[in-house]
Amino acid sequence: MSAKSTGVAKTKKVTKPLVPIKQTLLKDVRDLILSARRHVAQTVNAGHTMLCWHIGRRIREDILQEKRAEYGAKIVATVGRQLETEFGRGYSRRNLFHMIRFAEVFPELKIVQSLIAQLGWTHFLHIIRFDDPLKRDFYAEMCKLERWSTRTLHKKIQSRLFERTALSRKPKELARMELQALREEDKLTPDMVFRDPYMLDFLGLKDTYSEKDLETAILREMESFILELGVGFCFVERQKRMQIDHKDYYLDLLFYHRKLRRLVAIELKIGDFEAGDKGQMELYLGWLKRYECQPEEAGPLGIILCAGKSQEHVELLEPGKSGIHIASYLTEALPKAELERKLHEAVLVARAQLERQKD
C-alpha cells in the first residue's frame, strides 16, 4: 500500500552565501577575544594569589598571638578540614601551611602586589620553599623581569641559576641592595645577568670538538643558547670583522642586551683560560666602543667562555675592571650533587677573594 500524500511540500533550507569580509577584520576581532580571555585569566590568577596571601596572613596573626607551635598545627588542621569541605581541596591543611609560609616570607603587601602581575600562585609555591631570602628575592624578581612560566622557573631552579650568578658570590648586603634597585628602579646589573658555569649540554657535543664546532652548534641551537644566556640578549653577528692597523680580527659572537643597553662580545675557547685571552678581549671591546657603540649606550662587555680556568690567574688579571666576565661551560649535565659541590666551592672562593681585597 502506497503512503498517503500529506499535501504539504517540504521546503529546502537555503543557505545564504557568506558575505566576503576582510581577513584583517576577522583577525582583529579574534585578537580582541583572545586578549580579553588572557586578561580575565590574569585577573583571576592575581586575585587568587592575593587571596592566598591574605588567608596566610590572617591565620598567621592568630597563631603568633598564641605563641604556641602545637596550637598553630591544631588550628590549621581544624580550619583546613572545614574549608576543604566547603570550598574544595585548594584550602586543605597542607595548602593553608603554604599560604602561611607565603605571608611569612613575603610580609610586605606592596611587594606582593608588584609581583602578582607576572607571578601566579604556582610560581610562589616554588619560591617560598627557599630559606635564603636573597635566593627568594632573586627568583621572584627575575621571574617578573623575564616573564618566566612555572615550567621555566622550575628549570632555572634545577640548574642552580642563582648559585651560578656573580650576585650569589657577593656580600649579602651588596646583593640585597642590587635586588632592591632592580625591584624599585628596574635597574639590572651585569652580576645578575652573567653566569658561571654556563650549561651548554643542549649542544650535543661529545668527546673532542673544535672552536668552530662549538660556534656552529651554538648557531644551530641559538634559541636554547639565548635562553641560557638570559632574556634580553639579542644576536647581532657571528665572526664580527674588525680591522685594526690593516690587520683583520674576528670576534666569535656579538650580542646586544636590551636591559643593560650594551653590546656583549663573546669569545669561545675549547681550552682553559689563558692570560692572552684577556688582552684579546680588551682589544675587541676597545674597537667596539670606538666604532660600534651608540652615544646613549654604556660601554661594551665581554664574556670569555672557556672549558676551564685557574682561579689565581683570574684574580691576578682582574678582568672585571675591564668589563670582562670569564666563565666556564659544561657540555654535559653534571649529577646534581656534583654541580652543587662545585658551585658551593666557587661561592666560598669568590667570597674569600672579596675578603682579601678588603685587607
Image: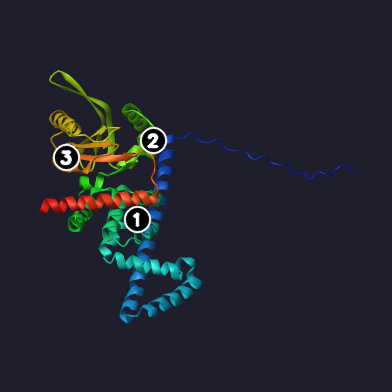
Q: Which residue is at a point 34% across and 55% down the rendered structure image?
A: 119
Q: What residue type is labelled 1?
A: Leu
On residue 119, the disc is: 1
Amino acid at dot 2: Leu
Q: Is residue 151 above or below residue 294?
A: below
Disc 2/disc 3 C-alpha distance (Å): 27 Å
Give 201 or 317, whichever is nearer the viewer.
317
Toward the viewer: 114 or 298? 298
Image spot of residue 142 (x, y percent): 29, 51
Q: Which of the two discs, 2 and 3, labels the residue nearer the N terminus? A: 2
Residue 287 numbered mark, or none: none
Tag in front: 3 or 1? 3
Q: In which quarter of the image is the N terminus?
A: top right
Res. 153 in view: no
Residue 302 in percent (x, y) is at 21, 36
Question: Residue under circle 2?
Answer: 203
